[in-house]
Image (cartoon, rainbow, N blue to C red):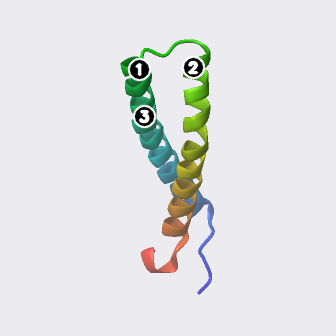
């Protein structure tokens, strides 16, 4: 089956993706903050920890966007 790509479905996909990304970033940011504060990190150490968190965060964002697009353009969901 071919995916349904209209302005309406793409807007819904973008909205769902934005919602999921914001929720994921809030959770990841909270974990980052908790670890950094517990270990007393400041300056360079906190930046390195942020860099370590950036790669999995980007992966989660890509998965959330792909999942939202596939869910909203699936003909079975219409």
Given residues 75 and 24, the one toward you in this image is 24
Q: Are marks 2 and 3 in contact (CB under 8 Å)?
A: no
Give the quarter of the image for residue 5. Answer: bottom right
Mark 2, secondary structure of its residue: helix
Name the residue tied to disc 2.
45
Image spot of residue 46 (x, y percent):
55, 20
Q: Is residue 31 above or below residue 47?
A: below
Q: CA–CA distance between discs 1 and 2?
A: 10 Å
Mark 1 neighbour density, 10 Å: few (under 14) some (14–19) many (20 or more):
few
Q: Is residue 51 above or below residue 74?
A: above
Image spot of residue 37 (x, y percent):
40, 18
Quarter that holds the N terminus: bottom right
| Mark in front: 3 vs 1 | 1
Quarter that holds the C terminus: bottom left
Name the residue tied to disc 1.
39
Q: Which of pointers 1 and 2 lies earlier in the amino acid sequence?
A: 1
């Amino acid at each position: 089956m071919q995916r349904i790509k209209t302005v309406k479905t793409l807007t819904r996909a973008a909205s769902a993706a934005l919602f999921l990304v914001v929720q994921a970033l809030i959770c990841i940011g909270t974990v980052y903050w908790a670890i950094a504060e517990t270990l007393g990190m400041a300056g360079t150490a906190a930046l390195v920890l942020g860099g370590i968190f950036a790669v999995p965060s980007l992966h989660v964002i890509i998965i959330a966007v792909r999942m939202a697009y596939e869910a909203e353009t699936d003909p079975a969901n219409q």
